[in-house]
Image (tube, helix red, strand yellow):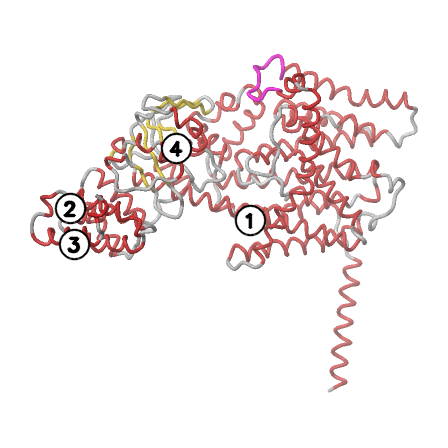
Amino acid sequence: MAKHHKQILEFGSQGVTAIKTWINHVSIPAWSVPFVLGVLVVVSYGIQIQKSGFYWDGWVLIHSLNKLGPDRFGEILGENRQMTATLYALTTRIFKDIPIRWQVFGLVSRWASGVALWWTLRQLWQAIWPHRVYQANWIALLFVVYPSFTQQSISVVYSHIFFNFSIFLISLGAMVKALRKPHWFWWLASWLTAGYILFALEYYLGLELLRPLLIWILLTPKALSLRDKVRQAMISWSPYLVLLSAYAVWRFYLLPPSRYGVGMKDIFLAEPLETLRSLVQTIAMNLFQVSLLVWEKVVRLTYLFTEPGERAWIYRLVVFGVSGFALFLFGKWMYTVEQGPIQRSPGQGNWIRQPVFLGAVFMTFAGLPYWSVPLEITLDFASNRHTIPMMIGASIVVVDLVERLASSTRRARIILALLVGFAAGYQFDVSTDFSTEWSFQRDFLWQLLWRVPSLEPGTMILGDAFPFPFSDDEAVTSMINLAYRSAENTYELPYGFFFVRNELGHELDRLGPETRIQKKYGPLDFSGSFLKMIAISYSGNSCLRVLSRPDGDLGQVYPGLLSEVVHFSDASLIVDEDGTYNLANLERFFGKEPAHTWCYYYQKAELARQSKQWNRVAKLGDQAGKRGYEPYVPEELFPFIEGYANVGEWEKAQQLTLDAFKQTRTLRPDLCAIWKKIPSAATAAGAGSSIHRDVLEELECDWLE
């Protein structure tokens, strides 16, 4: 027995040795990195794409496409985005307004930007730090999941931004390659792509200003005198300088002033010292936020390791799966290919000559356009989009700092793999939040159409506290106008939606019936007033509610700032007419009409109550009861209480009243108001009289008078 046990141990030991030997002799070629980046992008962002759709400005662009067609993006995006408009005209013809296509295109664009960065950094590192080329692998991995930017799911917008980012990085990489091994093809490729990106999108203007510094660094190892080096650098940079000059003339002299302007100039001239001090503080804080503080968000999410549920389980799988995958491939095999582990090179102790310093310079230059306007750079939605060009420098800083501060090469590999894994898990969790909002959008629109099957054109819709963290007033306006049919070939929008807190919160004390609200959505515009307005409430945890004027109220509670405007709400603008919504759009964006559960019956009952169709209300209540549906909040019983009472089904009305009262006794005034509204003729005889009296006594309604 002991001999047999010893043989098993020897066999196991030999097996472990064989696996170690195999790992030590296997290497993965560098060209496989793009495939690894593709896997990382899909795992981080792609798991939820079938449950994701349109958000934020993506809705506005899709609505404009649906309304005006792909050839009108020049009007939609403005005169300074004509090249981007041409790109949109092409992509919208391919992907149309189908959500899954845009989500896939967003993944491809994000992957392409990672591959372009990896290729560019390999060219640069081979020239400056040839023994540390492996860092390009880690930087590219970190870049595609960097946690400062969390809007990947807004694919209609950011697929183009990352597509253009890829082109800029290719331009930079082609320049580096041409400086290392001069060839007309690489110079031409770099000039053409640099020219395109300058006139297409200003996101990367700050990084464009880095070219002369990179040219100088790449010329440093060559045996040139200072004079020759300066001359060679100016010759190499001169085509880009011509492009920059042409861009400046076009941008600041030929185009009308931007809505952002360049505000820092005026501020600086007014208070130079204070402005300079504030600017230095802002730059330092932003650099710290994007490179280091951003990881606090990632660490904070680790509570999901102790939470139950499918979401937490997938999060853990993503974190450990990506970490292990990165550690196995890049931590071991890629080091074999890229000339071994970390090696000391000349100037290792001089931080100015190290990647961490170059990364800080990348971040600083990337932020210059935003600080000059100034635009806010934060880690919150939606301004974290301004960190996109800074993510290159931040990834370089993090990778090099980890390698410098870790006590060993193995520990550095483990830390970097964990950072990539946790960043991937964080991005997965954010994508889950986006998919949750998409389901809320779907629920909101269908409930709105059940309750408001037709609405008079020119109506303004007000809401507050919706569960739409990634969509604003313009987005909701777009989805509502897509949901209803509207006149063709007109720039006037029939409906405008506004969150009271955002658009009107600072003007509530000055609002009146004649107050006009006007809003432009590119070439489209909406004009309305409080004479034609309805207020709605939607939390995602209960049914959507149309809030009516006090004289027609069923005791509704007004959430948020809606209480300040609800007296303008006019439910008579709602027409009980089926079939006036755009079913084709709804099914294209959200799929077939969902199953009719409680909120469907509630919305139809509210619609019938509005026109006093009490038999219809009672019938809907019976249907909901037979199917076992129950209200989310007791207030949703109000239309059925009134409906049953008005058709003489007193026992049902009484039971629903007591059920609501037991759940929330604060509803006493509302329930009393409902029962006192019931016509006296309906309670004059039979059971109605006694039940009516019993309910008023049970609720102690006399005490409220």
Q: Is there a contact, CB below 8 Å, between mark 3 and mark 1?
A: no
The residue that mark 1 highlights is 429
**Residue 232, position as x, y percentages in the image:** 85, 22
Circle 1 SS class: helix
Identify the disc placed on residue 482: 4
In space, the residues marked 3 and 2 are separated at their CA atoms by 16 Å
Q: Quadrant of the C terminus?
A: top left
Tell me if I can see residue 467 in this picture.
yes
253 falls in the magenta region:
yes
In space, the residues marked 2 and 4 are separated at their CA atoms by 38 Å
In space, the residues marked 4 and 1 are separated at their CA atoms by 29 Å
Q: Is 90 left, or right, of 20 in this rendering?
A: left
Query: Depth check: 159 or 25 in front?
Result: 159
Q: Quadrant of the N terminus?
A: bottom right
Amino acid, disc 1:
Asp
**Residue 646, position as x, y percentages in the image:** 15, 46
575 falls in the magenta region:
no
Q: Is 372 left, or right, of 335 in this rendering?
A: left
Q: Is 8 left, or right, of 51 in this rendering?
A: right
Question: Going from the N terminus, do you reach mark 4 or mark 1 first?
Answer: 1
Q: Considering the whole magenta stretch, tell me its main secondary structure.
A: loop
Amino acid, disc 2:
Asn
Amino acid, disc 3:
Asp
The residue that mark 2 highlights is 646
The residue carrying pointer 2 sits among few (fewer than 14), some (14 to 19) or many (20 or more) residues within 10 Å by Cα, namely many
